[in-house]
Image (cartoon, rainbow, N blue to C red):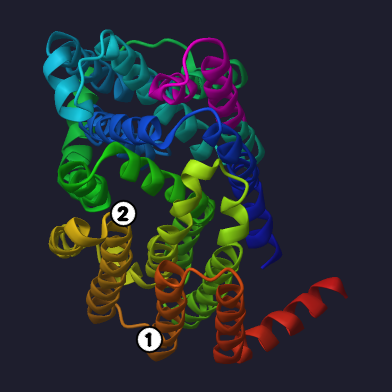
Amino acid sequence: MKQYIKGFLSFSAGTWIRAIVSFFSTPVISYLIVPEEFGKAAMFTLVYNIALLVSLTGLDQSFVRYYYQEEKRNELFWSCVFLPFTFGISVSLIFILFESHLSLILFGKDYQGIGLIFSISLMTGIFQRFNQLSIRMQKRGVLYSILDVVNSLGNVGGTIVFALTVSKSFYAVVWGQICGNVSALVLGFITDRESRKFAKVNFKKIGEFLKYGLPLLPSSLLFWLFSSIDRISLRQYSNFTEIGLYSAAFKIVSVMQLFQAGFTTFWIPLAYERFETRPDSREFFKKANQMVSLTIFLFGLLVLSFKDMIFLLFARSYRNASFIAPFLILQPIMYVVSETTVLGINFTKKTYWHIVVTGLSALANFAGNQLLVPYLGAKGAAISTGLSYVLFFTLRTLIAEKLYPIGFNLKKIYAGVLVVSLVAFFGTFLENFLIFPLLSVTGIFLILLLYRDEMIYLKNHFKNLHR
């Protein structure tokens, strides 16, 4: 257990520091950039993410898959980077050539030079993806965390400096993202020179890498759609101010998402290693699920209980985001819990089920957004997104249990989901700054009561660690 905790902390330390940086910097940025411009930045990020996915063509996953099989790591690095770099240039040219049309669709206005800025953002994003993966695959947890922190500080610093010296527009957020990527890239290339030495691209192996990575692309694109339907619907039925408020609410929830990223970085290799070395580790996986569920439910409710106080730190124009955030908390909660229950799909290598799960969840999210956003705006998008992740968890778990039965206590998990959902409902529609914290504390108490056996186990375990 000690080595697991140590491994988790080394890889997730940067994630937690990023969360702290994000927590304190977002209120500062809210005084520099109005919600409307923040909304435009969110639309830019939306398109950036899909362009990055298409450009990578799954070769980032191939890099991970073949890393320990290839002796010439620098050849693997540049062979996997070559096609994404080429596709990135092609996508960039499309954005530059059709800049006016795309700008009008995304922002309702023709922004000169946005195509070139998008190109710089995309190309630095491609290299940053492989930059992080190279460090991660070497299991250099401390350096991985430092890269995370440098990226975050560069992002925040770039955004604030641009807003104060050039323009308080969405350009500040975009240039901040570019500064973050470039800062992390410079550090990565300095500290990991051996794996990045220029090498001849192995075109024969690129074909092999594509055979593995390309089939993973549809699933990634579906997941992008699933997680982007909310902002697409808000662009369709609402305005940039609502998108900006929604994005600000997500910034607070992103503290949870960073926990999600840190956990999955640590958990996925551990789960595979455990399955390969001890195939019948059902009790281990069951116990891990119980501990993770307890932790993430408590963490989510703790964030919710302080939401109103947190948004008091924001500029007045962002305060209403406090009533958008509650249901969004279900997204990282359900994703993290599902990572401990989806094992059966991955262990049996029947990964096509991921496409089915994501597709059905995306359809449900689309239907929910179409029904709720016209009437409730950003609140409706948050409700639909949060509940669709409950469906996402359910589908993942039921299918995985059929393929590799572990016997998770689903009644306990759904009881926890019900508690969080009720607190989120009151947090969305009850505009009372005194009553809601009491409801959140009640929710925390109910979770502790529900997971009392797990609390006793953790208490005894940590006592033994200190002996």
Magenta span: chief secondary structure: helix
Disc 1 residue type? Answer: Leu
In which image quadrant can residue 381 be found? bottom left
Tally of numbered discs:
2
At 51% from the left and 77% from the top, the residue drawn is: 284
Residue 54, image x, y percentages: 20, 31
Residue 92 can be seen, yes or no: yes
At 48% from the left and 66% from the top, the residue drawn is 274
- Give me the disc on residue 278: none
Q: Nearer the viewer, residue 449 or 353?
A: 449
Q: The N terminus appears in which quarter of the rendering?
A: bottom right
Q: Quadrant of residue 463?
A: bottom right
Q: Residues within 10 Å of mark 2 (few under 14, many from 20)?
A: many
Q: Is residue 60 left or right of residue 208?
A: right
Under circle 2, the secondary element is helix
Residue 361 position by quadrant:
bottom left
Quadrant location of the C terminus?
bottom right
Mark 1 Cα-neighbour bin, 10 Å: few <14, some 14–19, many ≥20: few
Residue identified by numbered label 1: 410
Please provide the residue range marked out in magenta: 150-177
Q: Which residue is mark 2?
A: 378
Q: Position of residue 188 (x, y in %)?
A: 55, 22
Q: Which is more N-terminal, label 2 or label 1?
A: 2
Q: Secondary structure at mark 1?
A: helix
In the rendered structure, the answer to whether residue 267 lies left or right of residue 380 reads right
Q: Is residue 131 left or right of residue 55?
A: right
As for residue 156 lying within the magenta part, the answer is yes
